[in-house]
Image: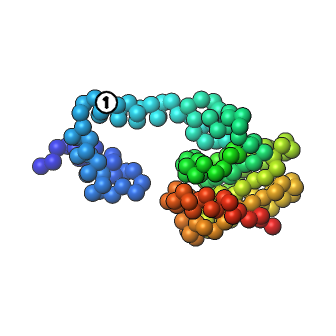
């Protein structure tokens, strides 16, 4: 019979998206073989991420301070905003080192079937930034899914009324795919070959 403690750990690991029962079991056995000091460091990292990570008050991304390191970086172009669905998309794009603007996290996409409308996202905060007159270009980097495209279309109509240039990353990404599954070269090309939304 398997230890109830090991079973409990496998159960917790299997709750991680994309981690099936076999992967969860491998991860649990990996933890079991670690030195005590490594396990304590791992546990400490889990606790720290829950206690010390917060939402950036400017972009909505993750930060360990009120304003994240990207928004507070004076070398970033704050007139160029890349709109993403969620926080992990920022990390994916940053790996390419091609984008030097700032971000705006929507915290999801418009999805009527799931009961998510424009008011449930951080869209009004984006409009407020655009109303300052300091934004020259918006790059829409939502995932190429039905919901992502619908969200981009919705934003385009509103932003065009504000006379702001609205671009969409190119279709180097497969339809129905997600940014965090794409390689850095594909994402970099998508930014380089971005197209203006009309």
**Mark 1 crowdedness (10 Å alpha carbons): few <14, some 14-19, many ≥20:** few
Q: Quadrant of the C terminus?
A: bottom right
- Comparing 106 with 185, the one in front is 185
Q: Is residue 31 visible?
A: yes
Q: Where does residue 118 sit, x and y in percent of width and height?
A: 70, 55
* Residue 18 found in image quarter: bottom left
Residue at image x 86%, y 53%? Answer: 162
Residue at image x 29%, y 34%? Answer: 39
Q: Where does residue 69 sit, x and y in percent of width and height?
A: 62, 35
- Comparing 107 with 80, the one in front is 80
Is 78 situated left or right of 8 in this image?
A: right
Q: Where does residue 17 sit, x and y in percent of width and height?
A: 42, 54
Q: Quick one: SS at disc 1?
A: helix
Q: Is residue 154 visible?
A: no
Q: Where does residue 89 sit, x and y in percent of width and height?
A: 57, 51
Which residue is label 1 attached to? Answer: 40
- Comparing 94 with 52, the one in front is 94
Residue at image x 56%, y 31%? Answer: 64
- Comparing 119 with 146, the one in front is 146
Is 27 situated left or right of 51 in this image?
A: left
* Residue 142 found in image quarter: bottom right
Residue at image x 57%, y 39%? Answer: 62
Is 144 situated left or right of 27 in this image?
A: right
In the depicted structure, whether residue 43 falls above or below residue 111: above
């Amino acid at each position: 019979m398997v230890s109830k403690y090991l079973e409990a750990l496998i159960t917790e690991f299997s709750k991680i998206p994309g981690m099936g029962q076999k992967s969860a079991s491998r991860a649990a056995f990996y933890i079991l073989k670690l030195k005590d000091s490594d396990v304590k460091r791992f546990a400490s990292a889990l606790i720290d991420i829950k206690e010390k990570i917060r939402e950036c008050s400017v972009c909505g991304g993750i930060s360990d301070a009120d304003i994240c390191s990207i928004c507070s970086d004076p070398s970033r172009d704050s007139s160029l905003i890349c709109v993403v669905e969620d926080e992990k998309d920022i990390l994916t794009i940053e790996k390419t080192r091609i984008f030097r603007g700032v971000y705006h996290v929507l915290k999801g996409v418009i999805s009527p079937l799931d009961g998510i409308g424009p008011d449930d996202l951080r869209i009004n905060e984006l409009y407020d930034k655009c109303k300052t007159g300091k934004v020259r270009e918006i790059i829409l980097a939502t995932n190429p899914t039905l919901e992502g495209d619908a969200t981009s279309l919705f934003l385009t109509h509103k932003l065009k009324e504000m006379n702001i240039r609205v671009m969409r990353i190119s279709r180097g990404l497969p339809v129905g795919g997600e940014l965090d599954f794409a390689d850095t070269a594909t994402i970099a090309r998508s930014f380089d070959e971005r197209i203006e939304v009309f």
